[in-house]
């Protein structure tokens, strides 16, 4: 299973970005998907997650600024980020968590996409 992120870049404080994550596989609709981030010198942390059923959860620091959603027909999960702050600067990673019933069960990570927010 391959996971590929895109959409990162440089944006000014208060701006917006939409990250995309494409996961290969015929059973994308059964995958739980998540967005994580890692800033220099810090541990990787959860940003947002969405289950195969569409339930979502967010880290407290999101404070209503980000939205995670998915398009199963496109094998894609998105992270819409608004009102970005300099402290949101990090490498953003996507992961796909395949169910136990899947032959390729397990967690797969993408290579990450850099998000830089200037003040």
Image (cartoon, grey):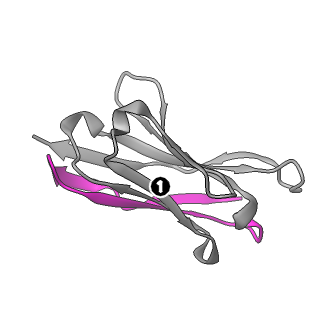
| Residue identified by numbered label 1 | 68
Query: Can the viewer see residue 35?
Result: no
- Above or below 59: residue 33: below
- Identify which residue is drawn at 21% across, 49% down: 83
Quadrant of image for the N terminus: bottom right
Q: Is residue 37 left or right of residue 107?
A: left
Quadrant of the rendered image containing residue 88: top left
Query: Can the viewer see residue 42?
Result: yes
Q: Nearer the viewer, residue 14 or 2?
A: 14
Quadrant of image for the C terminus: top left
Residue situated furthest bottom in the rendering: 73
- Identify which residue is drawn at 25% across, 33% down: 87
Q: Is residue 104 left or right of residue 28?
A: right
Q: Is residue 29 left or right of residue 5?
A: right
> Residue 77's spot in the image, x, y percent?
53, 62
- Identify which residue is drawn at 14% across, 46% down: 13
- Identify which residue is drawn at 43% across, 38% down: 37
Looking at the rendered structure, the secondary structure element under dot 1 is strand
Q: Nearer the viewer, residue 45 or 53?
A: 53
> Residue 41's spot in the image, x, y percent?
36, 21
Magenta stretch, residue numbers? 1-27
> Residue 86's spot in the image, x, y percent?
19, 37
């Amino acid at each position: 299973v391959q996971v590929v992120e895109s959409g990162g870049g440089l944006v000014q404080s208060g701006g917006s970005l939409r990250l995309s994550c494409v996961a290969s596989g015929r059973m994308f609709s059964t995958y739980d998907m998540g967005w994580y981030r890692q800033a220099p010198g810090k541990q990787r942390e959860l940003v947002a997650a969405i289950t195969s059923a569409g339930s979502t959860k967010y880290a407290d620091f999101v404070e209503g600024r980000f939205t995670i959603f998915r398009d199963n027909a496109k094998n894609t999960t998105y992270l819409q980020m608004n009102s970005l702050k300099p402290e949101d600067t990090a490498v953003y990673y996507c992961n796909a968590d395949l169910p136990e019933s899947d032959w390729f069960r397990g967690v797969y990570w993408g290579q990450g996409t850099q998000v830089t927010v200037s003040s």
